[in-house]
Amino acid sequence: MKRTLIFHVCAVLMDEAGTVLPDAYVLVEGHKIRSVGAERPDGPFDLEIDGGGDVLMPGFVNAHTHVPMVAMRGYGDGNALQDWLEKFIFPVEAKWDDRAMACCADLGLAEMIASGVTCIADMYMRTGVVAQRVARAGISANLSCGGVLFAPEFDPDTYSECIVQRALTEEWHGYDDGRILVDASIHGEYTSRADLWDWMADYAKEKGLGMHVHISETRTEHEACKARHGGLTPIQVLDRHGVWDCRAIAAHCVWTTPEDWAIMAEKGVTAVHDPISNLKLGSGIAPVAAMKKAGVNVALGTDGVSSNNCTDLFGEMKTAAILQNGVNCDPLALLPGQALAMATADGGKALGRQTGRIQPGYEADLILVDFHALNLTPCHDVVSHLVYAAHGSNVIMNMARGQVIYQNGEFLTIDIDRVKREVQDYALPLLFGK
């Protein structure tokens, strides 16, 4: 088993005490963290990494993504949501093939890896192709298809969404000692109906899967659900169909209510906050501080690049924190340590993984942040700097499950030049006629 020692780092452990350990030693064995401390452990080591006095922290968990949508970065910007979807996004998505999906997934994964992401929860089509690219890239992922049901008839033996869900689960769930997990999924209440909700809920329980759903992203979605279901919100309707009777993540939650939060806290449903996407699309601001006070676990996501334009979790953390402070007129509404936990430890909890902390037994998902950079100099508070001052370009190493996959600007698992050529020469002409 490979033994790697990381030393001469300031380690942000993300434990309950909020420990920041100066001049720390972190020992990695295989894909797990073996020890963390102020004393050098006994050797020998297969690899020693001198952190140069920089900050070592857990890798980010991007808990709601649509990775291949990097192809649509900036496409259709400046339009209202429904026009944007119907005139720009949906027509492009109808043109996907596996080759374009593969190179765009690689591009999206590379962007996240370079900015410190080590684990994702992704919901998108042609999910088997995304799984193949994740497997090569080296990060961990909870993958889902985003089940929809518009057809008047529903037979789970022949309906495409059920066939895809079963095939994806059988091929990929548990891959590489759990590096890839498959979640059941419902795209949203408004894009499906009870037949599919019941089937997905039962399938998740039968196979021990998690669940991934878009919830109350817009006021229109939320209110239309109440009109259809006698005043019940999406959280409440899906609860009646057993959708939350497993580990589950609910993306967005912008218009959720205190009654929703009570269900989420009781059932252990995580809200995934996507602040930049929600702001850009004019969807609103999720009541994160209130949800947390109600006992709801809240993680952080970027949503798709098509509605965010980048996947920098540093920017997402800062936006999340200052939004809550601003709308609540309270500078203590969401503290830096809480925002950092949303992007790390709370994301790990959301996905049912031991990641997001520097702690023995946890996955060796670790990133090194250059604290000699101008935007991080001087440093009075490491955690505050990570949330309010750092950005993705400050990441100089990404270790996913004990494997260094990015270092000093070099991708070690992705041929980035080939990917860029493939996107430019094949995917863009296919999708946009360029």
Image: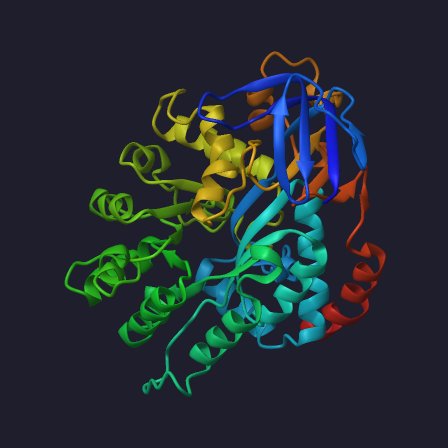
Q: Is residue 242 above or below residue 370?
A: below
Instruction: Please name whichever residue, 12 or 112, is drawn nearer the observer in this view of the structure.
Output: 12
Horizontal and vertical percent for residue 244? 30, 57
Tell me where residue 167 appears, x and y as whole percent. Answer: 52, 76
Any part of residue 31 in sight: yes
Q: Quadrant of the C terminus?
A: bottom right
Of the pair 431 and 193, the residue shown nearer to us: 193
Q: Residue furthest left?
A: 230
Q: How is the image coloured?
A: rainbow
Query: Taking 39 as reference, is 119 left or right?
Result: left
In this picture, is 335 found above or below 303?
Answer: above
Residue 210 position in % (x across, y down): 41, 58
Taking the spot 71% from the left edge, 32% from the top edge, the residue there is: 394
- The image shows residue 152, relative to residue 340, as above or below, that is below
Q: Quadrant of the N terminus?
A: top right
Residue drawn at 80 percent across, 49 percent down: 412
- Residue 26, image x, y percentages: 67, 28
Left/right of residue 46 with respect to residue 195 in the rendered view: right
Q: Report the label total.
A: 0
Q: Is residue 396 visible?
A: no
Using the rendered view, name the quadrant where residue 92 is placed: bottom right
Residue 399 relative to residue 289: left or right: right
Q: Residue at x 62, y 65 (%)?
A: 130
**Residue 336 shown left or right of residue 216 in the figure:** right
